[in-house]
Image (cartoon, rainbow, N blue to C red):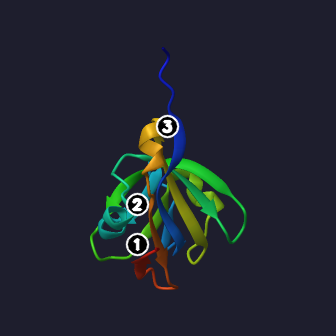
Amino acid sequence: MQRMFLKALKGKIHRGRVTQTRVDYPGSVAIDSDMLKAAGINVYEEVLVANISNGQRVETYVVAAPAGSRQIIILGAAAKLFEPGDIVIIINFGYYSPEELKGHKPRVIVCDENNYYKPQD
């Protein structure tokens, strides 16, 4: 019997604000490590960064910014598609068996205009 996995939301940082962009970097997005932990996103995991401010979407991987810094820094070529102050949704997916998905609840945090956040119920 073939085993099937379903792709579903694992973690999300909703309405975060880009604090900085840096084109001269190999690529990725740096996110406050406390925010990553709260959203259940691991360093080097793939994320989709959706820019609410201009509609751009970029897939990249995560690196950690200092804990408590509230930073979201777009690095590398993607920096040409974002500006400091842009509002973003950072989406992380996982693969689950149908059985695992039945009890799954994604970890979602919602940010205010200063990237202070609270878990979404």
Q: Nearer the viewer, mark 1 or mark 3?
A: 3
Residue beneath the point at 58% across and 54% down: 78
Residue 47: x and y, percent?
50, 51
Q: Name which residue type carries label 1.
A: Gln
Mark earlier in primary sequence (3, 2) = 2
N-terminal of the pair, mark 1 or mark 2, is 2
Q: Residue 56, how many percent across, how many down?
A: 69, 58
Q: Secondary structure at mark 2?
A: strand
Above or below, 117 relative to 93: below
Q: Position of residue 46 (x, y in %)?
A: 46, 45
How packed is label 1: few (under 14 Cα within 10 Å), some, or many (20 or more)? many
| Cα distance between the residues tagged 1 and 3 | 35 Å
Q: Nearer the viewer, residue 101 or 112?
A: 101
Residue wearing tag 1: 71
- Identity of the residue furthest to the right in this view: 55
> Dot 2: within a 10 Å radius of its alpha carbon, few (fewer than 14), some, or many (20 or more) residues?
many
Tell me, for residue 30, which label it has, or none.
2
Are the residues at dot 1 and dot 2 in contact (C-beta closer than 8 Å)? yes
Q: Are marks 1 and 3 in contact (CB under 8 Å)?
A: no
Name the secondary structure under disc 3: helix
Location of residue 110 in the rendering, given as x and y in whole percent from the top left corner: 49, 75
Q: Secondary structure at mark 1?
A: loop
Give the residue displayed 34% in from the left and 52% down from the top: 42
Residue type, mark 2 in image = Ala
